[in-house]
Image (tube, rainbow, N blue to C red):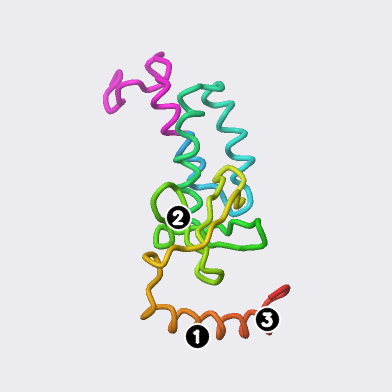
Amino acid sequence: RGGEGRGKGNMADGEAMSSEDKIKVAAGFIMKAPPGEVKDVVKDARVLVAEDALFDARLPAILKEYNEQHLVVATGDGAKVVLCKAGAVEGGKYIDPAAMRLVTVDHATASITASEELAESQRDPKVEEVRAAAQEALGRYAAGALAGG
């Protein structure tokens, strides 16, 4: 059946994958990385793409998406912030609602690199009361149920 059902660029056709296709495959591997293993998967993905400059340019966006989808916790500057789309604001910053701060995150290391006070325009007093009560209740639960609170 010589080639029937094979897609264009199939390795069985003897064609090499394009740089773009390699990046898509590498991004797929990264997005499926188990918690705590993303750095190792990125290292292996670099081998797949042969240290492609285009991959290096797209890696920050891939890692941002990974961190937000997997709800990675960024730490630093005395804070812990869950990285999620709901907490993201312009410029790649995230709201730390507990400290009422805006943090900048390095997605490659999931670390907080800078923080600043949250502007009044970014605060919602109607939400704050409920958020504070929920955080207090969750904090009590975590302190009693989880190692290290």
Per the rendering, the mark at residue 69 is 2
Q: Residues within 10 Å of mark 1 (few under 14, many from 20)?
A: few
Q: Residue at x 72, y 73 (%)?
A: 148
Q: Amino acid at mark 3?
A: Ala
Closer to viewer: mark 3 or mark 2: 3
Q: Secondary structure at mark 3?
A: helix
Q: Earlier in the sequence, mark 3 or mark 2?
A: 2
Which region shows up in magenta? Answer: 1-25
Per the rendering, the mark at residue 133 is 1
Q: How many marks overall?
A: 3
Please state the horizontal and vertical placement of residue 79, each as a whole percent of the image: 63, 63
Location of residue 146 with respect to 60 vertically, above or below: below
Q: Which residue is situated farthest in the top direction here?
A: 14
Q: Quadrant of the C terminus?
A: bottom right
Q: Amino acid at mark 1?
A: Ala
Quadrant in the rendering for residue 18: top left
Q: Residue at x 42, y 56 (%)?
A: 88
Q: Is residue 3 magenta?
A: yes
Location of residue 12 with respect to 74 vertically, above or below: above
Q: How far apart are the two marked residues, 1 and 3, measured between alpha carbons?
A: 15 Å
Q: Secondary structure at mark 2?
A: helix
Q: Earlier in the sequence, mark 1 or mark 3?
A: 1
